[in-house]
Amino acid sequence: MQTASKALLLAFVAACGGDGGGGGADASNVPATITVSGMATKRENTSSSAAAGVMVSAFQTADPNTAVANATTDASGNYSMMITTNGKALDGYLKATLATFLDTYLYAPKPLDADFSSASINMINSGTLGLLSGTLCGNAQDAAKGVIAVLVVDAANNPVAGASVSSTPAAAKYCYNSGGFPSRNATMTDTDGIAYMLNVAPGQVTVSATKTGTTFASHAVNARAGTFTTTVIEP
């Protein structure tokens, strides 16, 4: 079971991490176009492989029905897309789809105002989610609810240990990694900074983190039933 758990850790790392753009809606000197790129990986219980043929679409938060850019991952799982900004930071998200896998939504912690090359995407199936939520975290995921994987980082983009996460509305269970894999008994982030929000009511959810001596910025994501959402919480 520990081997399976450690493999699951890789599946649920929030994929927005890494250096990239993002300076807020009032950011100045936003280029006319920005490039968003990354790699998609398939996670099936304990196995992992590059995900070819994943459709990745970028959306403005204000218009979830019209993609502003599209790309398809190549044989190595890589993709790149150019997005027109009209001189404004992109307040939006990515959606990734692949047959037999859960739709994955990727939210940056703040609007993007520059190229972003770390938009990695983890595609998981229902079996992987069931193993994490029910077996490891002790709160079986309801297909009618949302699940959010979170990476808590500091100002230098390093994972933060000892942070507690929360959401509004509240999740039924906040689960954290401990010793490299998800633990139903952990109450704060380990050295990898990873946490999971299980069985969140569908709709807009504000995600937050707290740690003594550090102030983190809350932001909103949209939790969707039967899908997998990833994001980062930063100062």
Image: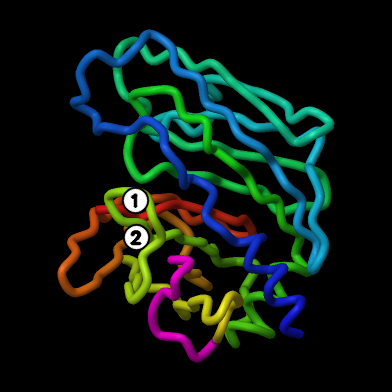
Query: Which residue type does callout 1 highlight?
Result: Ala
Which dot marks residue 207? 2
Q: Are marks 1 and 2 in contact (CB under 8 Å)?
A: yes
Q: Is residue 234 shown in magenta?
A: no
Residue 21 drawn at (x, y percent): 37, 30
- Say whether residue 141 is left or right of residue 62: right
Q: Is residue 8 above or below residue 131?
A: above
Residue 204 drawn at (x, y percent): 38, 53
Main SS type for the magenta part? loop
Q: Residue at x 37, y 26 (%)?
A: 90
Q: Residue at x 71, y 41 (%)?
A: 97
Crowd rating for badge 2 (residues with CA inside 10 Å; few <14, some 14–19, many 20+): many
Q: Is residue 181 above or below residue 227?
A: below
Q: Is residue 186 shown in magenta?
A: yes
Q: Residue pushed farthest bottom? A: 185
**Which is nearer the N-term, disc 1 or disc 2?**
2
Q: What residue span does the magenta drawing correspond to?
A: 184-194
